Image (spheres, rainbow, N blue to C red):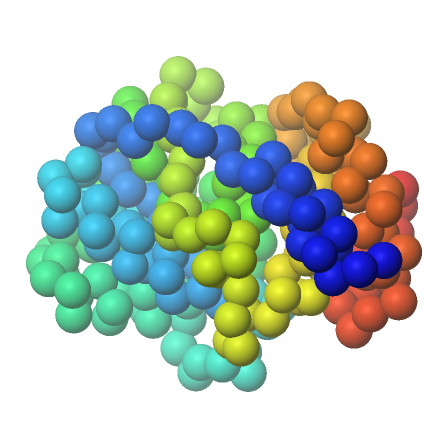
Amino acid sequence: MTNEKIDQLAQIIWYYHLMNHKVEKADCILALGSHDTRVAERAAELYLQNYAPIIIFSGGTGERTPEMWKNSEAEVFTKIAIKMGVPKEQILLENKSANTGENIQFTYNLIQQKNLHFKKIILVQTPYMERRTYATFMAQWPNKNTKFTVTSPQFSFQDYCSDKYPKDKIIAISVGYLERIKIYPDKGYQIYQEIPDNAWNAYLELLPIVKSGSYTNYLTNQV
């Protein structure tokens, strides 16, 4: 398969993962920790544009960040936001979670402890995690009356990839996360999300390439 064809298939999956929600003013911005500090920058930008009066950074030590930072993802993200001009007192930290389910559980507990009441929350994640994040929060967030929108750093597939975020790694992640969108609703982890034929066919064509590469650990091996 040519590199051009691989890019075409990868972009189909990339744009499927994007929810394309219109960001509107909310009660809180909740940024989920990851290896990509541009998530923190996106959350800070939204705060500085007055989309919400408070930011919560949620994330302890994930699978891939221990070799990057000594501090938790939430602490790293907080420093970035403060440097960009977000007042420290407008930031809450949840720095123990290791996955999205724990992001939800621990952040909800923090909100309850602070006696805060959020009807609308803006979720900020990496682009290839938008749909999974939304589907997971819709399934697992305890207060079913909460309205969620999800957004991410504003990059095209080509612009997102770089030496720091290699294209083959991003493709492997995107393919693996599409697997999860397929199988996780039956496990109760996420709400059902329709997968168009073109996205699933792109997954099937890229799967052998991912399996032959260096990033097979992003696959579930259950599909």
In the rendered image, which quarter contains the C terminus?
A: top right
Judge by depth and name the residue closer to the eye, 25 or 66: 25
> Which residue is situated farthest in the top direction here?
145
Please state if 130 lies on the left or on the right of 152 as rendered: right
Residue 108 vertical position relative to residue 68 in the rendered view, above or below: above
Answer whether residue 69 is visible to the viewer in this image: yes
Q: Position of residue 1 (x, y in %)?
A: 85, 58
Q: Residue 108: name its quadrant.
A: top left
> Residue drawn at (30%, 31%), measured in percent from left and top?
23
Q: Above or below — where is 52 with respect to 211?
A: above
Q: Is residue 148 left or right of residue 79?
A: right
Which residue sits at x=69%, y=22%?
194
Residue 193 screen position, x and y as percent = 65, 24
Total marks placed: 0
Q: Position of residue 183 (x, y in %)?
A: 79, 35
Residue 93 in view of the camera: no
Q: Which residue is drawn at 53% across and 64% down?
A: 161
Q: Up-down: is 45 above or below 165?
A: above
For image coordinates 82% across by 36% down, the residue present is 201
Q: Which of 152 and 119 is in front in this view?
A: 152
Name above or below for residue 191 compared with residue 76.
above
The answer to whether residue 133 is left or right of residue 44 is right
